[in-house]
Image (cartoon, rainbow, N blue to C red):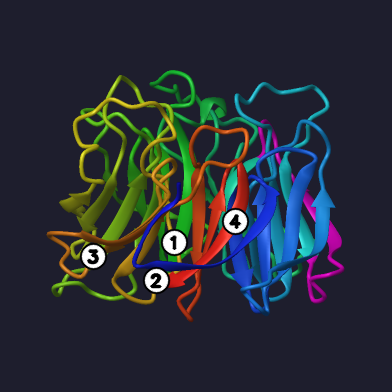
């Protein structure tokens, strides 16, 4: 039975499970987890009655679970599906579409990569901040692409953790898929880079061709889960600059309780300092299976209430007004999709009007608002 507090369900859209949901104008773009389901475009002009207007299918053996739309350009990733066993015919990269008419998207380019392809990315309408595999490097690195001409993307700059550039004589110092670039967020002339079990990094991109490391924060060990997202708040809290850091409940390095969300003080960005954490009451000392705990905050921030996708525990809305003591103020735990024993809340998009588009990795999307 679904559990809900402080939220109202406006509608449910039935669709194959997804990795990311992105809203632009009257349309919602859903990137799915498994082929042949690629990207679904949904008319949400009436959020109580979402209506599919187009679907882009993908070939077997492709994972296309992320999507961004800006300036009528849609980007979707092509990646080798986990556990990342490459087929000799696989081609990863970034598919680029014109979506001036969302009901009739037109592909205008495909930017090819090496290896397993592109995982996540940020996109500001001109530049894409992506996480591709690149020839000569161990696993995914950070790269900036210029899409001024979307039909001809051009690399602007790249950055990697020391040890990844094997073609340059560097030696990786870890085991299977421990250090790789997972997600990048841009704010101003800074990139906030989540680097899996290597923690997170802050980069200066005043010169995009030469990203420069400002600082790193790493807490594994002693904590066991990989860093998924580093999200800077666009305003100060208690006079301080704050970064929200979410870990993902996968690939923990040893048995442990589920992961949680960190609040990090970056007022002096050379010295990121943990201020506090948020964990669901009762989960702080219980070893539980993967896909139970924290995953991904809404990357759209309009106030101190932050919706966070929390896998089996649904959507949690966390008020960070006091950065020393974040507090849960609302939640929605949906019923398990048919054929599954628990929810898999994977992503949430928050609109300026306060609507929350909540996507399950196994099936379906709910549209919610604060009650």
Task: Tell me the SS state at disc 4.
Answer: strand
Near mark 2 (Cα within 10 A), the count class, few <14, some 14-19 or many ≥20, is some
Task: Tell me the SS state at disc 3.
Answer: loop
Q: Real-space Cα distance between discs 1 and 3?
A: 13 Å
Q: Upstream in the sequence, badge 2 or badge 4?
A: 2
Residue ID at (47%, 64%): 207
Q: Real-space Cα distance between discs 2 and 3?
A: 11 Å
CB atoms at circles 2 and 4 under 8 Å apart? no
Task: Tell me the SS state at disc 1.
Answer: loop
Q: Upstream in the sequence, badge 1 or badge 3?
A: 1
Frontmost residue, 79 versus 103 = 103
Q: Upstream in the sequence, badge 2 or badge 3?
A: 2
Task: Tell me the SS state at disc 2.
Answer: loop
Residue carrying label 1: 298
Horizontal side of residue 224 vs 22, given as left or right = left
Horizontal side of residue 32 vs 226, given as left or right = right
Residue carrying label 3: 320
Horizontal side of residue 38 vs 84, given as left or right = right
Looking at the rendered structure, which numbered label has been put on residue 365?
4
Q: From the top left corner, tell me how far across and down residue 30 is, in percent.
A: 66, 57
Q: Real-space Cα distance between discs 3 and 4?
A: 26 Å
Frontmost residue, 340 versus 260 = 340
Magenta stretch mostly in which secondary structure? Answer: loop
Q: From the top left corner, tell me how far across and down residue 338 is, in percent.
A: 62, 39
Q: Upstream in the sequence, badge 3 or badge 4?
A: 3
Residue ID at (68%, 72%): 49
Residue carrying label 2: 301
Q: From the top left corner, tell me how far across and down residue 137 is, in percent.
A: 56, 31
Near mark 3 (Cα within 10 A), the count class, few <14, some 14-19 or many ≥20, is many
User: Closer to the observer: label 2 or label 4?
Assistant: 4
Residue 103 lies in the magenta stretch: yes
């Amino acid at each position: 039975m679904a559990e809900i507090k402080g939220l109202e369900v406006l509608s449910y859209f039935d669709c194959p499970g997804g990795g990311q949901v992105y809203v632009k104008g009257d349309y919602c773009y859903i990137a799915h987890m498994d082929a042949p389901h690629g990207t679904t475009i949904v008319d949400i002009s009436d959020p109580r009655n979402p209506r599919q207007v187009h679907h882009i299918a993908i070939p077997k053996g492709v994972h296309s679970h992320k999507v961004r739309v800006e300036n009528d350009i849609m980007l979707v990733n092509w990646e080798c599906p986990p556990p990342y066993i490459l087929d000799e015919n696989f081609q990863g990269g970034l598919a680029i579409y014109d979506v001036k008419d969302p009901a009739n998207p037109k592909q205008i380019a495909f930017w090819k990569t090496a290896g397993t392809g592109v995982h996540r990315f940020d996109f500001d309408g001109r530049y894409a901040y992506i996480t591709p595999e690149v020839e000569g490097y161990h696993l995914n690195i950070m790269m900036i692409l210029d899409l001024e001409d979307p039909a001809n993307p051009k690399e602007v700059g790249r950055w990697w953790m020391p040890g990844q550039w094997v073609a340059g004589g560097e030696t990786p110092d870890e085991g299977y898929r421990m250090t790789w670039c997972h997600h990048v967020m841009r704010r101003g002339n800074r990139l906030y880079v989540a680097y899996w079990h290597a923690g997170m990094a802050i980069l200066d991109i005043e010169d995009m061709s030469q990203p420069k490391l400002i600082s790193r924060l790493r807490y594994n060990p002693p904590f066991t889960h990989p860093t998924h997202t580093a999200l800077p708040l666009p305003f100060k809290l208690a006079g301080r600059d704050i970064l929200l850091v979410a870990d993902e409940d996968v690939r923990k390095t040893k048995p442990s309780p589920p992961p949680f969300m960190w609040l990090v003080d970056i007022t002096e960005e050379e010295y990121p300092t943990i201020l506090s954490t948020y964990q669901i009451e009762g989960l702080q000392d219980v070893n539980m299976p993967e896909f139970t705990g924290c995953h991904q905050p809404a990357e759209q921030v309009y106030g101190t209430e932050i919706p966070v996708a929390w896998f089996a525990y649904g959507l949690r809305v966390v008020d960070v007004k006091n950065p020393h003591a974040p507090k849960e103020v609302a939640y929605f735990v949906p019923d398990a999709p048919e054929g599954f024993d628990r929810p898999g809340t994977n992503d949430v998009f928050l609109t300026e009007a306060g609507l929350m588009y909540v996507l399950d990795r196994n099936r379906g999307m709910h549209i919610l608002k604060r009650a």
